[in-house]
Amino acid sequence: MQITDIKVRKLFNEGPMKAIVSVTFDGQLAVHDIKVIYARDKFFIVMPSRKNPDETYRDIVHPINAQFRGVLESAVVEAYEAALAQ
């Protein structure tokens, strides 16, 4: 599965959430509302989630293994940094 497009939808100046992005895979599947977070001196991503009745959150979609999470996170953070440079 290849990442074919990353769109930075919204940028934030205040707080730990820095951006909301959409990622397209193989030109056929889009995942919206991936959040770019800056905390503890590093960037990471938070996948789209929904709130459960017990006030916990559950990811709607997520990477299955750490290797793909790393690839996805690197690509999203790189797109975020490119959007900041514009």
Image: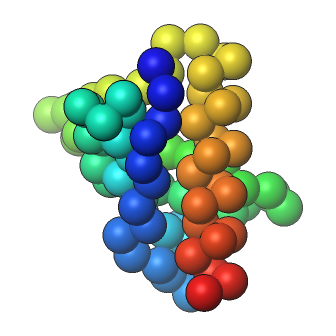
x, y percent for residue 84: 63, 81
65 versus 78 height, above or below: above
Place residue 81 in its image quadrant.
bottom right
- Residue 13 as seen in the image, left or right of residue 32: right
- Residue 51 as seen in the image, left or right of residue 11: left
Residue at the extreme right: 41
- Looking at the picture, the colour scheme in use is rainbow
| The C terminus lies in quadrant | bottom right
In this orientation, does residue 34 appear? no
x, y percent for residue 62: 42, 25
x, y percent for residue 80: 59, 66
Residue at the extreme top: 65
Please give the name of the residue rendered at 61% of the width and 21% of the height, measured from the top-left corner. 68
x, y percent for residue 72: 58, 36
Please give the name of the residue rendered at 35% of the width and 41% of the height, measured from the top-left corner. 24
Please give the name of the residue rendered at 64% of the width and 71% of the height, measured from the top-left corner. 82
In this orientation, does residue 85 appear? yes
Residue at the extreme left: 53
Q: How many labels does the image show?
A: 0
Place residue 30 in its image quadrant.
top left
Please give the name of the residue rendered at 40% of the width and 61% of the height, measured from the top-left corner. 7
81 versus 35 height, above or below: below
- Residue 86 as seen in the image, left or right of residue 23: right
